Amino acid sequence: MARVLALVADLLFGSRVQGQLGAAGHDVELIGDAAGLRRRLADAPAPRAVLVVDLTDPQLGGARLLEELAREGALAGTRTLGFYSHVDVRARKRAERAGFDLLVPRSRMAREGAQLVARLSTAP
């Protein structure tokens, strides 16, 4: 299954994501802030499989962070999955411009996260 880094500041939802993905056989590391993700990406052996980013938390700045990491070359070999609040159209559009491989509403992430990660990890 996939190696997953999950940038989710909300501990409750982060635990849910980690549990769901872990139960499906994915190796999940939960990270609570952008600085922690930057440190982890600097230390992680390549290739990384999937980066899951919570776009509902403005403190994380997920779309901006993805753009910066991509520009720095820190996402080589990494597929990206962002989840957003279904009512936050601005966040979704911003994330689309940032270049996420897949964007889904938070409710879909809660229901289908393991399948979405599996799909991304096997896509070319």
Image (spheres, rainbow, N blue to C red):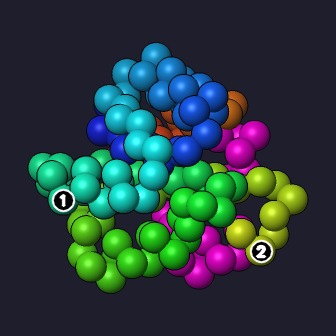
* Callout 1 crowding tier (Cα within 10 Å): few <14, some 14–19, many ≥20: few
Quote the CA–CA distance across marks 1 and 2. 30 Å
Numbered tag placed on residue 90 in the rendering? 2
Residue at the image point whose x is 61% and y is 71% from the top: 95
Q: Is residue 19 above or below residue 41?
A: above
Residue farthest toward the top in the current orientation of the protein: 23
Specify whether residue 79 is in view: no
Mark 1 vs 2, N-terminal side: 1
Residue at the image point whose x is 24% and y is 75% from the top: 73
Q: Amino acid at mark 2?
A: Arg
Q: Amino acid at mark 1?
A: Ala
29 relative to 85 in the view: left or right: left
x, y (%) of residue 79? Answer: 38, 58
Numbered tag placed on residue 42 in the rendering? 1
Q: Is residue 107 above or below residue 61?
A: above
x, y (%) of residue 55? Answer: 63, 58
x, y (%) of residue 15? Answer: 54, 26
Q: Which residues are magenta?
A: 92-109
Q: Is residue 99 above or below residue 119?
A: below
Residue at the image point whose x is 55% and y is 44% from the top: 9
- Image quadrant containing the C terminus: bottom left
Name the residue nearer the viewer: 5 or 11: 11
Name the residue nearer the viewer: 63 or 27: 63
Q: Quadrant of residue 24?
A: top left
